[in-house]
Amino acid sequence: MKQSQTYLTTSLKDILPTSSELSIGNIPLSQIEKLVSTTPFYAYDRQLIINRVKQLKNTLPKEISLHYAIKANPYPSLVQLMAEQVSGFDVASKKEMLLAIQTGMPVNKISFAGPGKTIEDIEAAIIAGVTLHVESVGEIAKVELAAKQLKLKANIALRVNPAFELKASGMKMSGGAKPFGIDEEQIAQVLKDLPLKQVNLRGFHIYTGSQNLKAEAIIAAQQQTFALAQQLVELTSKITNIKIDYLNIGGGFGVPYFANEQPLAVSAIADNLQALLQQYKALTDGVELILELGRYLVAEAGIYVCKVVDIKVSRGTKYLVCDGGLHHHLANSGNFGQVIRKNYPLAIGNKLNSKELEQVNIVGPLCTPLDVLADKIMLPKASLGDYVVVFQSGAYGASASPKDFLSQPQLSEILL
């Protein structure tokens, strides 16, 4: 993927094109449009994903097992590619679980998380043999009942809601009252009450937050995570005499979306993990240590592409009206967790080298003022039929958007 202009984030400035038209996997946008038959579409760069995973593996300690959280992007071709790159999957639904299994990933390398699993979800997970991340006492009771009825033993890990949080996190998922996981102060009683005839306790899942660009915050959280894990392992051994073989320490690695944001300093995190592995050598002996990442592995390898279908001026403001919008890319519209809307990095995909810039607002086709792709952004002067490209779109794009809103045409996805 080749692109660079002043309106891009720091992490995109080193992939400059030699032509005026953006290419993905060495295929120009105009040819990709012919492949998928229409705009809008998402295109994912296979080699960028492979490179990101390889780079991360080369940086992290070899003892760390890298898992992909399918919720970040469940496009089947992309998930199949990931099955060849990572050591395991985390899933958040029965549909994702079945997709993960069909890639050929060993079931003992697949975990199933989420606070609202149904009996049907739990039964399917037990039958498949994946590891259920149980998130409440009530869920443990459901697992016990399902396992009894199926005459099978369920593989589980206890998801823990620690007292600490991941500071500077885009989404905080621990500390205080949370719907995710069992409060750490309740774990001792939960271990005492575990129905060990029906469940195989593999270990623990400690997930604190996501989309974090502060290495020092992730380092602090990981230090607290290892300390808590040590306490939990000792408690488990004392109460149940079980030696765990599984510890998911979550992820939280963020990517830069907006101007002035800097890429995460992963090397500092890796150095800290290496030190923690030495400090907690007894804890990690014979235990799979899992780093669970989604967005970080795929976000920067994807683009969203739509076309300019109208150009208008309203009281001095120029609008580019496109055939795609928030119904395909809710996060870019600012309606997926942003407190103050900011522009994702954008380009006119067939005019990358144009020097004639103008300030425009870019909107979608929907009958709502929320349908905004960019606000007051400087871009090359556009014409009807030009491509509007939204970068950093490989995670939480198509599957995280209300594609049926206002019954607009569907979009396409392609891995190149």
Image (tube, rainbow, N blue to C red):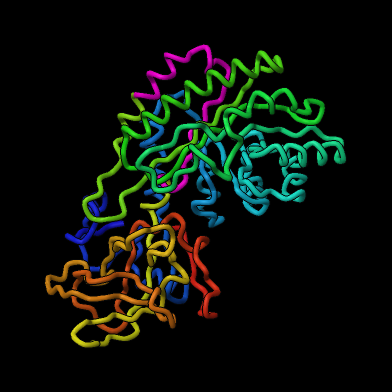
Quick check: 280 above or below 316? above
Image point 43% across, 66% down: which residue? Answer: 329
Q: How many marks?
A: 0
Image point 37% across, 38% down: which residue? Answer: 167
Instruction: Give percent across and percent down for residue 116.
Output: 66, 49
Quick check: 250 above or below 197? below
Q: In the shown orientation, is residue 126 left or right of residue 267?
A: right
> Any magenta on residue 273?
yes
Quadrant of res 296? top left
Q: Is residue 238 visible?
A: yes
Instruction: Give percent across and percent down for residue 313.
Output: 23, 87
Q: In the shown orientation, is residue 107 left or right of residue 179?
A: right
- The quarter in which the N terminus is drawn is bottom left
Magenta span of residues: 272-296
Instruction: Give percent across and percent down for residue 41.
Output: 44, 69
Q: Nearer the viewer, residue 196 or 298?
A: 196
> Any magenta on residue 270?
no
Q: Is residue 51 visible?
A: no
Image point 40% across, 24% down: which residue? Answer: 273
